[in-house]
Image (cartoon, grey):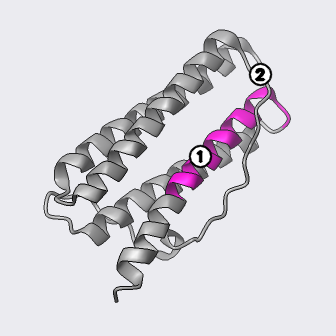
Amino acid sequence: MKKDDFSAIIDFAVDREKEAVEFYQDLQTKTRFAEMKETLKDLEMMERGHINTLETIRTQGLEKVEVKEIHDLKISDYMVDIEPSPDMDYENILIVAMKREQKSKELYEDLAKRFAGEEIEKVLLKIAAEETEHKLRFEKIYDQHVLREN
């Protein structure tokens, strides 16, 4: 892979992670639920961690990258997208967050396929797995606080 291509992929991924940070910051201002604000803050910090990881890869290159296998409950796979709004209830906040993480996961998996066999593939798959982990976190909360209460 050319250095310019590698750098462009890192730039793209960093921009996506910055968008995610802003998204979670915005959701924190929209929710009335203290537990959800805390969860959203944690996710914001995880996305910031992705930015740091990507910047480290840019400057120091790739080291051994391990991709974790994450179980996917697939709860959000069958839900309709919801636009964030100031009057969202807890259930809708969870749906918005799950769908966003699902789309991020799919994006990184698609990018990894495009670079199959190249050094960047594992980095993209690692980020996809982390996005799946975020999605799973929301799905578990949804399962415990929405599905079981209904």
In this view, the residue in front, 127 or 83, is: 127
Residue 46, percent from left and from top: 47, 38
Return the residue found at the far top.
59
Per the rendered image, the range of residues in magenta is 117-135
The residues tagged by marks 1 and 2 sit, at their Cα atoms, a distance apart of 17 Å
Return the residue found at the far right.
117
Q: How many marks?
A: 2
SS at mark 1 in the image: helix
Amino acid marked by disc 1: Glu
Residue 32 appears left or right of 141: left
SS assignment for the magenta stretch, majority: helix
Residue 53, percent from left and from top: 58, 25
Residue 147, percent from left and from top: 41, 83
**Dot label at residue 130:** 1
Residue 16 appears left or right of 145: right
User: Residue 56 falls in which quadrant of the image?
Assistant: top right
Amino acid marked by disc 2: Glu
**Dot label at residue 139:** none
Residue occupying the point 53% across, 70% down: 77
